[in-house]
Amino acid sequence: MNVQAPNSITIRQLQIFVQLAESRSFAEAALRLHLSQPALSIAIRKFEESVGGSLLSRSTRMLELTPEGRAFLPVAQRLLHDWDEAFTDLHNLFAMQRGKLTIAAMPSFANSLLPQILKLFHQQHANINISLLDVVMERVMEAVLDGRAELGIIFEAQHMPGLEFMPLCEDSFVVLLNPEHRLSQLKSLSWTDLHGQSYVAMNRGSTIRAWCEEAVKQTDAHINIVAEASQLSTVGQLVAAGLGVSVVPAICREDMLRRGLCCVPLAHSGPAKRIGVIRRSRSNLSVPATHFLALIFERFVFA
């Protein structure tokens, strides 16, 4: 008997074999499968030809499984179960009855505006597990590029190869001060006002550090960097401890106020910086990511 390739076997043939094996009756199996008995006989015969031997014994009034049939029955039942489960899982993914969404966001956004957006998303899609990577914006870009996160939220960077940037809003800068600092009561400050001040900076290589250094170059001010940190929250703690002042994005304002710090607007800080969502260029987003993207753009209107 000529044995056909395994990929010639269909799911319908497996269903026919399992129904016959479980009911031990052509009449009952035909009824369950909505087939005529002749069509059922032809189908099982073709299946046996495909696998290379008999699976059912027809020598008695009652159908019996051959030894090969008995050995194959649990395998066929498992295959049918896995098939059904696979398509149930796929349907649930598209229907958002289950799934996962991974977002990377710079801490300034993750600690301020993002929690309320994630709360709304969870209320609408409670079965989607949310994973948040709150890392500096350079790591956000890396996470999206290498596929660890579908979406990222960052300030617009000068170079973003392989990424699509979708603007959400604009942000300015504030001067971060200990409440006891002599400048904390002023309504606004400039880089010139910070001349000679002890300064807590973001680490070299960070976009915020580069922006601040470029802004200082445009003035006659000189700041004395006494400490550096890779997280804005750490910068806030160092300022609170009295090490110096700092300049941070205004998006951090609420978080810094909760820490008991003063936030004074920075005048003449140059053009506002755009905050937006990034995704890999020409990538296909999952259903959860598509819904999250729609939700976050409902909350922000870029002007």
Image (cartoon, grey):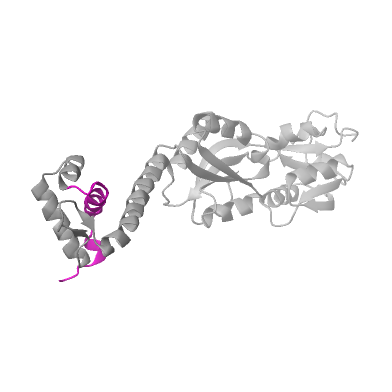
User: Taking 294 as reference, is 132 above or below it?
Assistant: below
Q: Position of residue 187 (x, y in %)?
A: 79, 28
Specify whether residue 19 is painted magenta: yes
Occupied quadrant, residue 129: top right
Instruction: Give the side of residue 77 with respect to residue 187, left or right.
Output: left
Q: Position of residue 225 (x, y in %)?
A: 83, 52
Most distant residue in the left direction? 38
Q: 162 or 5, which lies in front? A: 5
Q: 110 or 195, which lies in front? A: 110
Q: Residue at x 85, y 32 (%)?
A: 184
Instruction: Give the side of residue 144 with respect to residue 15, left or right.
Output: right
Quadrant location, the N terminus: bottom left
The image shows a total of numbered marks equal to 0
Q: Which residue is drawn at 16% across and 64% down?
A: 49
**What secondary structure prevails in the magenta region?**
helix
Instruction: Give the side of residue 7 with respect to residue 135, left or right.
Output: left
Q: Position of residue 152 (x, y in %)?
A: 56, 46
Specify whether residue 124 is painted magenta: no
User: Taking 280 as reference, is 273 above or below it?
Assistant: above
Q: Which residue is drawn at 53% across and 57% down?
A: 146
Occupied quadrant, residue 168: top right
Q: 210 or 93, which lies in front? A: 93
Most distant residue in the front direction? 60
Is residue 158 something one can see in this rendering?
no
**Magenta part of the chain:** 1-25
Q: 7 or 160, which lies in front? A: 7
Q: Position of residue 249 (x, y in %)?
A: 70, 40
Is residue 231 something one can see in this rendering?
yes
